[in-house]
Image (tube, rainbow, N blue to C red):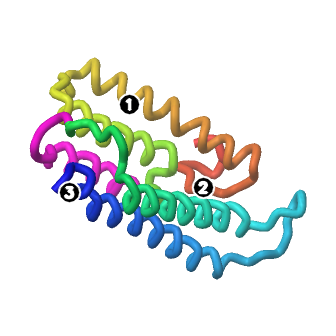
Amino acid sequence: MTLENRHSLPQTLVGAGVVLIGVALAAGAISIPAAAGYGGIGPNFLPWTIALVLALCGVLLVVEARGTGFRELDTPSGATWGYWPGFAWVTAGLLANAALITTIGFILSCTLCYLLAVQGLRRANGQAAGRARVLAADVVTGFAISAPVFWTFTQFLAINLPGLTATGWL
């Protein structure tokens, strides 16, 4: 059995999974209204575009896997097993964001999500993560990312995101 044949089934399954995700996104896009908005493009344009491109990429992955397989496949690097504590940190960040976004607002919940996710990634990479200076830098970076996103959506695009105050700035 050649190396290409040995990897063919898993590679085909990955491509089929990508196709299925594209189909699922298309199924969700059906429920979005098609009424044209500003510039003649409706709210369903981007979901349909993403669904179609993702399905196309999945089909191309399946074709490649069934043909010659993914060429020049490097030997996997890194640990044999995943770093579960890092996964737990990232998951905690996502869950905390979902649970707290309406309570403490978009900026602070996204900053907390960033802090927890980066802690997991730092620990998985063997970096010093729990030091006060690193934590402070991660909080500042998370705020520096989430605040402009919040302000762009609320102030410039007039899209309501949960805020801490009614001013639209926090």
Q: CA distance from mark 2 to mark 1?
A: 20 Å
Which mark, residue 6?
3
Residue on which the image places disc 1: 139
Q: Is residue 56 left or right of residue 86?
A: right
Could you say whether the residue bearing mark 2 is in a helix, strand or loop? loop
Cβ–Cβ below 8 Å for labels 1 and 3? no
Residue 129 occupies quadrant: top left
Q: Is residue 8 left or right of residue 141?
A: left
* Front residue of this view, candidates 132 and 68: 68
Residue on which the image places disc 2: 161
Q: Where does residue 58 sit, x and y in percent of width and height?
A: 48, 62
Q: Residue furthest top?
A: 133
In percent of the image, x 52 and y 74: which residue is there?
Answer: 23
Sequence-wise, which precedes: disc 1 or disc 3? Answer: 3
Q: CA distance from mark 1 to mark 3?
A: 45 Å
**What's the amino acid at mark 2?**
Leu
Residue 67 occupies quadrant: bottom left
Which mark, residue 148?
none
**What's the amino acid at mark 1?**
Val
- Front: mark 2 or 3: 3
Q: Where does residue 49 sit, x and y in percent of width and height?
A: 66, 62
Q: Magenta segment, which residues?
A: 77-98
